Amino acid sequence: MTRLLTAAFSLLALNTTFATCEAQATTALPDNAHNTAPAAVLAAVPAELPTVVPAVKAARKKGTIYKEEVDLLIDAISKHGKGAAFGGDSTFATAQILCAMGHCHRCYHRSDGPIVRPSIDALLRARNNDGSFGKGDEALRSNTTPWVVDALEIMDGDGFADEITTARAWLQQRAVPPSGWQQAVSAVLGLVRSDSFPQQLATKEAAFARTSYAAPDAQDTPLLAYNLLRLVACQEANRLLDKAQGPLPTTFSESQQKAFNFLLAQQKDGIFAMSFGGKKVQDPSITALGLLALQTKPRGLRSQLEQAQIELGLHWLLTRQNEDGSFGEMVLNYTTSVVTGALARWNDPAAKPAIDKAQKFILKCQFLEANSYQSSDRDYGAMGYGGTSSQRADLSNTSFALQALKESGLPQDHEAFVKALVFLQRTQNLTAVNDFSGKVPDPDNQGKLINATSGDDGGACYYPGNSAAGYTVLPDGKSIPRSYGSMTYALLKAYTLCGLKSDDQRVQAAVAWIKANWTLAENPGADPALGEKVKYQGLFYYFMVIAQALDLAAVKEVTATGKDGKPENLDWRKALRAHLESMQQPNGAWQNGKNDRWMEGYDVLCTCYALLALEHCR
């Protein structure tokens, strides 16, 4: 119960969820028990989505729900069993029915004697010598045993302590989640939204209970077990929401909802398109970024229509994976990284195989020995837009890839994070750690070379020796690639993803640059000689990485110049939120009207960046 209550508080206070599809609540149930296939999602979506999705006001019922239906169904199950075990020959169904009965409003217990005794005895007879329960191979027993443990625990945890302990050890050795009941309740909590509450999530099961009561012998035992379990899981979820004593999350502002509505109007069936050669083409990268942005709205606040559109897009992304685990046709590493982020937020078991394959592809994109790179090579440890065969690496793509690897579950001590530090240090203007120097092509003068070296201000450039913000030429003719805002925040984010702590000199140097150059008016660091327009290149990308980096690094305040000209501590979240809201267009979108470089003339892209920034401005 403590773990479930913690889960409910986490859902409400932290806007997280344990599951995104009802199938998780019914692990190993009959396939016909509940259909959550993509076709079901498609059927729920109208042909055209309105430009603005109105807020749906709905009230959650408090207290015990489905009381009558649970009583009717238990009565039907009892008559169906005719005094024998509730699940007949099925240990799985018997365990589910006992578990549900113990958790329902009647709180059935071992002390209820003949009501539950035959079923408990049947479970004990199904115990195997290794501590597992049920018949069949290890996979079948792995499905059954968690439910038996839950049933024995709720019926008499102390009395069956030995059986429970041995079974849990068996499950732990096989990495099987120990509680099917917790997954069932968590799945209900994951479906709670602004217009969908527990009292609405088992209407079919409630109708089934009434039908079964009228004709108890006409139903199959597995369906009786499933429907009772679903009804009682809704009861438990509602109790947890009562104990939380709070409304659904309310951290999605009017400005964010306007942007959310704008993005919804730009997609079709969850898919976003890009213009190529005068034609609109469905594109995995912008679709993934759009779905990332849409998923910044807390799941509990999304309407069913909004959730359905998001899931349509996520299901579509799953169909776009290539054989090698990548997504897209060009810029494969970038696209795969962004898609991985969108799928990871979905938190649906259906996405895990795709995420695992994507992780392996991203790892292959890292410039390491396996790709004939040596630690002395400039790009060692990094990733670029594509693979490793032709396109050079850069700090932006490396930070995207590292985030995707982290979100895909790659362990913190994996060599990918360790070796990425070699490249990250070479992008930082910090002579104590940056060992890169040498001649590199001048990005602004075809055929000319720059004799690059490291500076020492703690900021970062695009890749070793290259900066979109210009160069500082030293008296000896060597050039320092200028540090600039978006790349310095990308560096801080990447360092944190690689496990560096706040007391590390590399992190401290980056934070010092940030505090010395704090501004929201421009992407700071550009050489004034490059002209006024350069200051605004990548501005919305800059806003996004500000929020991601400072939040990830747990930086609460930055130093800014006050009205009196003296330095003052500033709540960056509040400042960034206010600044973005002041820039929002009437239609809910954002657009970089001062510099459209890096596609920031495209309002969908800028709006995605802005929403991804605002989610960190709590």
Image (cartoon, rainbow, N blue to C red):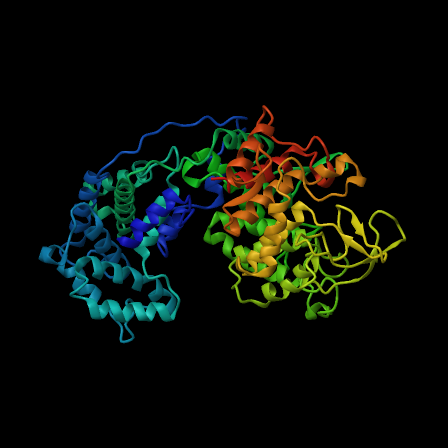
Considering depth in this image, is 269 or 381 the residue closer to the camera?
A: 381
Residue 120 appears in which quarter of the rendering?
A: bottom left
Considering depth in this image, is 341 or 37 the residue closer to the camera?
A: 341
**On screen, 585 above or below 311?**
above
Instruction: Tell me which residue sits at (49%, 34%) in the image.
Output: 45
Q: Is residue 262 left or right of residue 112?
A: right
Question: How many numbered marks appear?
Answer: 0
Res 309 seen here: yes
Residue 600 appears in which quarter of the rendering?
A: top right
- Residue lying at the far right in this picture: please name it: 447
- Residue lying at the far bottom in this picture: please name it: 129
Res 320 seen here: no
Q: Position of residue 567 (x, y in %)?
A: 57, 40
**On screen, 19 above or below 127?**
above
Q: Is residue 472 left or right of residue 205?
A: right
Q: Is residue 181 left or right of residue 548?
A: left
Considering depth in this image, is 482 or 262 the residue closer to the camera?
A: 482
Instruction: Tell me which residue sits at (53%, 67%) in the image.
Output: 413
Q: Position of residue 180 (x, y in %)?
A: 32, 56
Instruction: Tell me which residue sits at (34%, 67%) in the image.
Output: 171
Q: Position of residue 440 (x, y in %)?
A: 82, 58
Q: Position of residue 146 (x, y in %)?
A: 30, 62
Q: Is residue 42 left or right of residue 507?
A: left
